[in-house]
Amino acid sequence: MAVLGDNTVGATLSVGLVGDVKSVSRFAVASSLQFTTGYHYLVNNGTAAQAVRMVVYDDLAGAPGTLLGQSIEQIVQPLDVATPPTITGVLTPPGTLTAWPDGWVQFLFPQAVTIQPPYVWVGLHRGTTGANVKGRYNIGVSAQRNDVYSDGPSDPFGASTAGTVQWSTWIDVSPVAAVRGLVHVYSYPAGRAT
C-alpha cells in the first residue's frame, strides 16, 4: 500500500466546516490505482457531533467530475473536557496529534474504488449539523460546492467554486491487478507423445 494525497498535518486549521457542502482537493495520479480506505485529519471543538463522509471524484478538464466512490459515514464527536473525546475510527500513530482531539479519521469504502491518471479529487461531504468539525490544510488546488448531505453526494460533482486548500487527506492505494494474458490450451492427437 502507498499514500496518495497529503498525509502531513496541515499548517492551517480551518474554520468550522459548514454542513451540506462538499470540498475536495486535487492530487496527481501516475497510474491506475485502487483503494478501500481513506483518512482525513479532523478536530471537533464545537458543541455537537457532525456526520461526514469521504468522497472521491475523477478529473474532468481540471475540475472534479464523476463520483468514483463515497465512504461509510463517520460521526465526529465533540471535545468534552470532562470526558476523553472520541473520534470514530481515529488513528493516532505517534507524532500525528497536535492537540487532542485532533486526529486522522479513517474512512472505509464499501467496495474497492479505482482511480486513473492524471488527477483525482479527494475530500469530505459534510453533514447538516455544521461548523463543528474543522480540518487542517496546506496550499493546493481545491473545489467546493453546496450539496445536501441527506441524499448523498451528487454525481457528477457539478459547477464548483475553485480554491487553494489542500486538505490533509489521503487514500491508501495499491496498483490495479494486471490483466493476465490468455492461457492457450494445446491438445495432441491420441497416441502422440507430448
Image: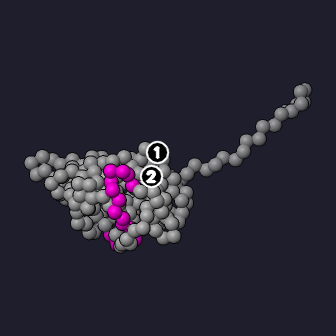
Measured along the vertical axis of the image, is residue 120 above or below residue 108? below
Residue pushed farthest top?
A: 191
Query: Where is mark 1, residue-wise?
Result: 111
Q: Amino acid under label 1?
A: Gln
- Residue 153 position by quadrant: bottom left
Proximity of marks 1 and 2: CB atoms separated by less than 8 Å: yes
Query: Where is mark 2, residue-wise?
Result: 69
Considering depth in this image, is 117 or 159 the residue closer to the camera? 159
Counting residues from the start of the chain, the first of labels 1 and 2 encountered is: 2
| Image side of residue 167 versus residue 85, left or right | right
Measured along the vertical axis of the image, is residue 86 above or below residue 188? below
Q: Amino acid under label 2?
A: Gly
Considering depth in this image, is 55 or 35 the residue closer to the camera? 55
- The residue under the point 28% across, 54% down is 127
| Image side of residue 35 versus residue 146, left or right | right
How would you rate the neighbour count of disc 2 (Cα within 10 Å): few for under 14, some for 14-19, many for 20 or more? many
Identify the magenta region. Answer: 138-153
- The residue under the point 64% across, 49% down is 179
